[in-house]
Image (spheres, rainbow, N blue to C red):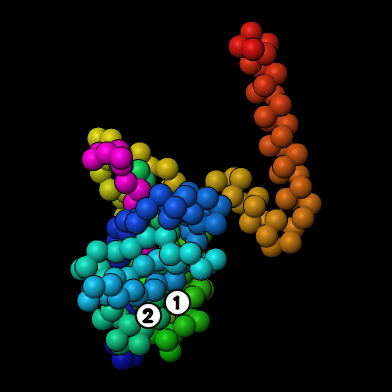
C-alpha cells in the first residue's frame, strides 16, 4: 500500500469577540460537532477559522496551525475539525473564550474510510473522550483494513487547568441531545424535552417557595 497522506492533531482556537463566543456556547455549536475550515486573508496573513454547520465562523487558529492547515489544503487534503471543548479565562480582563478542536486532514481517495472514522471520533468526543488523532502510517493501514470499527487506543488529556480558567463545554449535554433529536424531526422527543424542562423549573420554584426564599 502506498503512503496515505494524513494530518491529525488537537489544536487551540481563540475567539475574536463575545458574539462568536455566544455562538460557541449555544446549541448551534455542540461538542462533537464537525466544523469546516475556512481561510481568511487579512493584512497579508492567512488565518484558518472554524465554521459551524450553520455557516458561522466562531474561532481561529494561530499562525503555526494555520500554516499547517494551508499545507494540507495545498496537498488537496480534505480538512475537518471536531469541537472538543470551550473554555473561558478571566485574566487579563475582560477575559477570553477559547478551546480546542481535533483537526483531521486526509486523502480524498479514502473519503469513505475517514468519514466513518471521524463519525466515531465525534461520538467519543460528545461523551468527553478525546481520542488521539495523531495517527502514523501503520495505524492508518489498520484503519483502512477495518474502516468501520478501528479506533486508536490512546487518549489525549485535557490541557492542565490554569488559575482563572473554567471549562464551559467538554461533552454533549442532555438538553443538546434532545435539541438534536428535534432538529432531525423527532418532534415528540423535542416536545417532551420542553415539558421536562418546564416541570423541572416549576419544581425548583416550588422548592424555593417552600424554603421561604420568596
The quadrant where residue 76 appears:
bottom left
Check whether the beta carbons of the residues at disc 1 and disc 2 lie within 8 A of each other. Answer: yes
Q: Position of residue 35 (x, y in %)?
A: 45, 67
Q: Find the distance from the CA under tag 1 to the CA under tag 2.
A: 7 Å
Residue at image point 40% right, 66% down = 50
Q: Position of residue 203 (x, y in %)?
A: 70, 24
Estimate how packed mark 1 is, as few (under 14), some (14 to 19) or many (20 or more) residues with alpha carbons within 10 Å: many
Magenta stretch in the rendered image: 90-102
Q: Secondary structure at mark 1?
A: helix
Q: Which residue is mark 2?
A: 106
Q: Work out which quarter of the rendered image holds the N terminus and state it.
A: bottom left
Q: Looking at this rendering, what residue extends furthest in the front direction?
A: 43
* The label number, if any, that marks residue 64 in the structure image: none
Q: Secondary structure at mark 2?
A: strand
Estimate how packed mark 2 is, as few (under 14), some (14 to 19) or many (20 or more) residues with alpha carbons within 10 Å: many
- Residue 82 sits above or below residue 196 on the image: below
Of the numbered discs 1 and 2, the one sitting upstream in the chain is: 2
State the residue in front, 97 or 138: 97
Q: Which residue is mark 1?
A: 114
- Residue 14 sits above or below residue 76 on the image: above
Q: Looking at this rendering, what residue extends furthest in the top direction?
A: 212
State the residue in front, 160 or 35: 35
The quadrant where residue 6 appears:
bottom left
Amino acid at each position: 500500500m502506498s503512503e496515505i497522506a494524513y494530518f491529525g492533531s488537537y489544536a487551540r482556537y481563540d475567539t475574536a469577540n463575545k458574539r462568536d463566543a455566544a455562538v460557541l456556547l449555544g446549541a448551534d455549536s455542540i461538542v462533537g460537532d464537525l466544523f469546516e475550515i475556512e481561510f481568511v486573508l487579512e493584512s497579508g496573513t492567512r488565518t484558518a477559522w472554524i465554521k459551524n454547520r450553520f455557516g458561522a465562523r466562531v474561532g481561529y487558529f494561530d499562525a503555526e496551525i494555520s500554516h499547517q492547515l494551508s499545507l494540507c489544503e495545498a496537498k488537496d487534503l480534505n480538512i475537518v475539525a471536531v469541537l472538543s471543548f470551550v473554555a473561558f479565562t478571566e485574566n487579563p480582563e475582560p477575559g477570553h473564550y477559547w478551546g480546542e478542536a481535533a483537526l483531521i486532514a486526509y486523502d480524498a481517495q479514502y473519503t469513505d474510510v475517514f468519514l466513518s472514522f471521524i463519525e466515531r471520533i465525534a461520538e467519543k468526543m460528545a461523551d468527553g473522550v478525546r481520542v488521539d488523532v495523531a495517527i502514523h502510517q501503520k495505524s492508518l493501514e489498520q484503519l483502512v483494513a477495518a474502516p468501520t470499527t478501528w479506533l486508536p487506543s490512546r487518549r489525549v488529556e485535557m490541557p492542565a487547568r490554569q488559575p482563572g480558567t473554567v471549562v464551559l463545554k467538554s461533552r454533549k449535554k442532555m438538553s443538546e441531545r434532545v435539541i438534536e433529536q428535534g432538529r432531525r424531526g423527532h418532534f415528540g422527543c423535542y416536545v417532551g424535552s420542553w415539558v421536562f424542562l418546564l416541570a423541572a423549573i416549576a419544581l425548583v420554584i416550588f422548592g424555593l417557595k417552600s424554603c421561604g426564599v420568596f
